[in-house]
Amino acid sequence: MGLFARLFDSWTLRTQQREMQSFVGQLAAMDGCEIGLLLAVATHMRNNLEDEGKMLMDPIVTIPVDPSPILILRGMITEYQKARSMSDAAAAMVWLHTMRVGARHELRGTARAMWRELSRGMPHVSGASVDVYRMTGQFPRIYGHDEYPKGLTPEPA
């Protein structure tokens, strides 16, 4: 790898680390009910993407074989932000940060911290799904909301 490639790689890693740490900080400022709503939307999104063949629950195995989920999620975030749908953008960010671990193992510790924060919302997801129904007229698909992606449990055993 040449000098320019190493510099670009280092810059990319720092940028991704900074973005993920900022996201974790935002999660830390939220209460469990707020995170429950985010997790309900994120779980619904994951279930839909998995129906389309994009496996998100094992990023360390998935991304080296098929990096397309990262590109898809970045595109989704851009579109949600343009539409000012910040809750959907935040839900997609959960999966973008999760999937980046498959390409950059250095992000794994921060991803574990993210899932530690997200776990505070797990008991509130069922109640939040009712709120989503009130807002959209559809219940989100929350199957598996209490599962962690492989390799990203908050406290490794």
Image (cartoon, grey):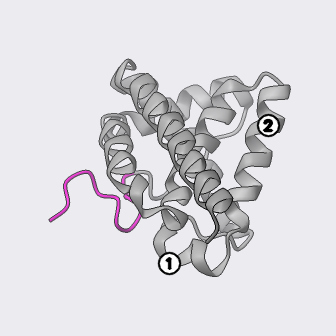
Q: Toward the viewer: 83 or 135?
A: 83
Q: How many labels does the image show?
A: 2
> Looking at the image, which residue sits at the far bottom?
65
Q: Which mark is residue 77?
A: none
User: What distance separates the C-alpha of mark 2 from that of mark 1?
Assistant: 26 Å
Answer above or below: position of 17 versus 61.
above
Q: In this view, does 50 lie to the left or right of 146?
A: right
Secondary structure, mark 2, is: helix
Q: Toward the viewer: 46 or 109?
A: 109
At label 1, the amino acid type is: Val
Q: Does the magenta stretch include residue 154?
A: yes
Residue at the spot 43% in from the left edge and 30% down from the top edge: 35
Residue 46: x %, y % from top left? 60, 56
Residue 30 seen from this side: yes
Secondary structure that dominates the magenta span? loop
Residue at the spot 54% in from the left edge and 31% down from the top edge: 130
* Range drawn in magenta: 146-157
Residue 59: x %, y % from top left? 51, 67
Q: In this view, does 104 lie to the left or right of 147?
A: right
The reply to whether the C-beta atoms of the residues labelled 2 and 1 are less than 8 Å apart is no
Answer above or below: position of 93 versus 5.
above
Q: Toward the viewer: 157 or 16?
A: 16
Crowdedness near tag 2: few (<14), some (14–19) or many (≥20) residues, C-alpha within 10 Å:
few
Say which quadrant the C terminus sits in: bottom left
Q: Quadrant of residue 27?
A: top left
Q: Name the residue under label 2.
A: 78
Q: Is residue 21 magenta?
A: no
At label 2, the amino acid type is: Thr
Q: Quadrant of residue 70?
A: bottom right
Residue 138: x %, y % from top left? 70, 39
Secondary structure, mark 1, is: helix
Q: Name the residue under label 1.
A: 61
